[in-house]
Amino acid sequence: MRRRVLPVLLALTLLVLLADLAGAPLGPLRGAGDAVLGPVERLVAPGDDEADRLERDNIRLAEEIRTLREQARAGRALDELDAGELRTVSARVVALDRAGASGPERVTIDVGRRDGVRVDSAVIAPDGLVGRVVSVADWSADVAVVGAPDAGVGVRTGPRGVIGTLSGSDPTTTHAADELVITQLTRARTTKGDDVTTLGSPGQRPYPPGIHVGTVTRVEHAAGALTDTAVVDPAVDLATVDVVAVVVGPDRTSRRTP
């Protein structure tokens, strides 16, 4: 249609130019041209309103696709969360707070008191321990992550279950900012590659036993020290953690749709 219209437009334009050069009165000709060309021009070139509408539709569709992809990814992460017999409520990380040299020291999640979350509830991700709840509002909660100051965790290391305390730093040990450190409480030896799990707390608060925390990457035997110090690669990347589960009881697991 547009290919047939364009030659007509060119012919009419040429006619107006020739008449102008010849000195002919252009008022009636221009009026007739406007009457003919106006509808044709609107047909050939869509108006601003139509272009704006198409742009808005494209933006809306792109946002819907992004939302569906996020929901699918969250669903896959929830399927990977295995809390055993622990009763949990699922949540999303919505903010990173008080960032330190090794990453966030706290995160905010989108569940709270109305969901059964309490202070000292453990928070886990598909790969392992995230931290513990330190403050709760009706619909949100703040979580002190593993390795944050004053967030020591009792742990067991390796097949022998060597007991120690895990923290974010140790003045006698050199390690990367995103690594953790275990100060052992016994003389039993640990080795590189040993798994680190939570020791467990009385009443399972804040930490139930057996939650994966990380993997030993190096063991230091300081001269004169009675016990070892182990450097640990944490199981969870706290800078990118998204879907988590909050332990709200020792009963059967119960998950909420994200």
Image (spheres, rainbow, N blue to C red):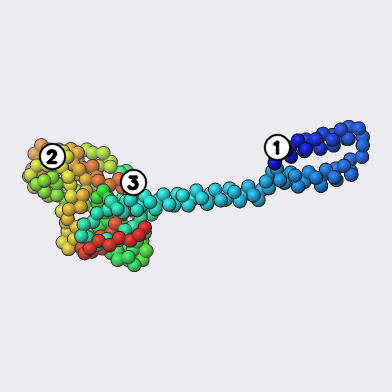
**Which residue is depicted at the point 61% across and 51% down?**
53
What's the CA distance linking mark 3 and mark 2?
27 Å
Q: Earlier in the sequence, mark 3 or mark 2?
A: 2
Q: Earlier in the sequence, mark 3 or mark 1?
A: 1
Q: Earlier in the sequence, mark 1 or mark 2?
A: 1
Give residue 232's position: percent from left, percent from top. 21, 42
Q: Residues within 10 Å of mark 1 (few under 14, many from 20)?
A: few
Which three-letter amino acid code belongs to the residue tagged 1? Arg
Which three-letter amino acid code belongs to the residue tagged 2? Thr
Give residue 109's position: percent from left, percent from top. 35, 57
- Can residue 152 be seen in this snapshot? yes
Quarter residue 36 falls in:
top right
The vertical placement of 53 against 6, above or below, is below
Nearest to the observer: residue 51 or residue 186: 51
> Under tag 3, what secondary structure?
loop
The vertical placement of 177 against 132, above or below, is above
- Can residue 106 be seen in this snapshot? no
Please report contact status of discs 3 and 1: CB closer than 8 Å, yes or no.
no
Q: Is residue 112 left or right of residue 231?
A: right
What's the CA distance linking mark 3 and mark 1?
56 Å
**Which residue is depicted at the point 85% across and 37% down?**
16
Quarter residue 246 falls in:
bottom left
Q: Nearer the viewer, mark 1 or mark 2?
A: 1
Placement of the N terminus among the 4 image quadrants = top right
Please report contact status of discs 3 and 2: CB closer than 8 Å, yes or no.
no
Q: Which mark is residue 191?
A: 2
Placement of the C terminus among the 4 image quadrants = bottom left
**Which residue is depicted at the point 49% across and 50% down?**
63
Residue underneath mark 1: 3
Q: Residues within 10 Å of mark 2 (few under 14, many from 20)?
A: some
Q: Which mark is residue 239?
A: 3
Which three-letter amino acid code belongs to the residue tagged 3? Ala
